[in-house]
Image (cartoon, rainbow, N blue to C red):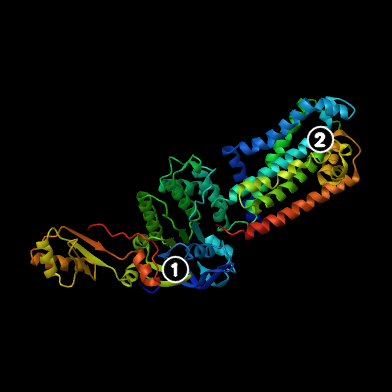
Amino acid sequence: MSASHAMADAVTMVRRNLVHVRYYPTVPLFVAGIPVLFLLLFVYVLGGTLGAGLGGGRADYVEYIVPGVLMFAIAGGAQGAAISVATDLAEGIVARFRSMAISRGAVLTGHVVGNLLQSLAALVLVVAVALAVGFRPQGSPLRWLAAFGVLALLALALMWLAVAMGTAARNVESASNLPAFLMLLPFLGSGFVPAESMSGPLRWFAEVQPFTHAIETIRALLLDLPLGGVALAATLAWSVALAVGGYVWARRIYERRSVR
Amino acid sequence: MNAPRHPAAITVRGLRKAFGATSVLRGVDLDVAPGTVTALLGPNGAGKTTTVHILSTLVAPDGGDVTVAGCDLRADPDGVRAAIGLTGQFSAVDGLLTGEDNLLLMGRLRHLGKAERARRAAALLERFDLVDAARRPAVTYSGGMRRRLDLAMTLVGEPAVIFLDEPTTGLDPRSRRAMWDQVRELVADGVTILLTTQYLEEADQLADQVAVLDDGRIVAAGSPDELKRLVPGGHIRLRLPDAVAFAGATAALPDARPDDAALTLEVHGGTGARDLRAVLDRLDRAAVEVDALTVHTPDLDDVFLALTGAPTRPAEHEEGPR
């Protein structure tokens, strides 16, 4: 298997994943729609009170919440990837792919990259809505670019983890349940309210869990706040670890998983 | 059966496979000559699908030697993959893509150029009567259309060896005959085919060689006729209109088994045209009128009863009147 064939096969599978969107657009709508809905809900329903709790108002709360909503969107996109890979594995088409002389990782790479592109599109949409409701980030273009890079890396990491979960899942239902906890993590961190405001053990968890580091890093980059070295290092470290671990895990299960 | 003149397209020696404690294949030997059809016949659970899955590189064997299209299965699985096509028991089409996109996808994965992809896709849509449905997602296809698209996708890579796992299971009679015609066309083009089936009639129609798989072993192999000759149960059955004719027929055919109550006679032995003519001549000479004549040839049940001592299906059906 030459490298150019492996690349061509991966591109073919990414294209296939994106063409699916044309015929079955509910998952990407869900991936982009839920975070937008949460953004509007939190800003207009809860934002006045939560903003006052932060010592400001609704406008201050918009500034605070956007990084958490972006992480929430990435987690939702990862769930979409788990569903799409599990749906695929339930079909006979994957057995056909496995009997063909194509790069062994191409099917999974197609799901990861295809869903990653959908997730990045969802992020752009969320940011657009955030700007429309008053989000006024202070960071320089360079910092914006850095924030986008960190988000893309995080998305890639969660994508591989979720694709591994989707490959391991026995059916599509459990594939959609397994990564669902990822969508809770922005809430159990500093995504929607500061970790310091939480109670006892939850506060401890919220302060140490990886999503908090990621959210703080993105917040600092977007709002031009001092960048925490520990948070940035932790975010990069666990992103790389999850991406590599998820990739190795997914490939191993894919190879082992016997056809029907 | 003729001895293969060319090196075999598929060679299997001592193939073994177990899933956990369950031994599925217990030493399968098989040779398939190039450009021929071999039918792997057997009941559910005999190991047919496992055999196809191993030969098409989906499942690793526990033991044995396999070469497909000159490539060793273990040493060069990608060589095997490049030479084969697989149409499985379950539909292997991408339901979310159109029929045309499915074919173009196969062309991309076979690393064909753009013009060649388009040319092959168009030709296959035409050949499999899918032109009108080409731009519709495959989920909207009927069972027969999906099966046709499935085989068309297998053919995009112009494979030298094709595995068909129960290609007509669940198809209506018309679609089944269309599939048989496609198989014959492929063989005429020089393709080697290994197909699995539960239907003796299908093996009879298509196969040069039939291998009967039971409980993980090949229990018999040969041409369909050779196989049927292994099995007793072939007979000509006569129904007479009345007691007078019945008595006349019984006298004319003293070896037949009479059934007085049903006014029928069973002539056991050969069921070929010559045997049939001999029976009719004797009845003619005795001036006996026959109400109905049916030829019963051995079916899968008979074959299995004889070869393994266990029937595959409870129901028995006879061939219709000839």
Q: Is residue B113 above or below residue B296?
A: above
Could you say where residue A31 lies in the image, as x and y percent from the top left? Answer: 68, 37
Q: Is residue A93 above or below residue B207?
A: above
Question: Element type at marker 2?
Answer: loop
Q: What label sits on residue A192 in the rendered view?
A: 2
Disc 1 target residue: B213
Asked whether residue A147 is in view, the answer is yes
Judged left or right of residue A209, residue A87 is left
Judged left or right of residue A139, residue B113 is left
Residue placed most toward the observer, B126 or B57:
B57
The quadrant in which residue A117 appears is top right
Could you say where residue A93 lies in the image, as x and y percent from the top left? Answer: 55, 51
Residue placed most toward the observer, A249 or B9:
A249
Q: Which image quadrant: the C terminus of chain B?
A: bottom left
**Residue at position x 35%, y 53% in the image:** B177
Q: What label sits on residue B198 in the rendered view?
A: none
- Disc 1 crowd rating (10 Å Cα; few below 14, some 14-19, many 20+) is many
**Residue at position x 40%, y 57% in the image:** B183
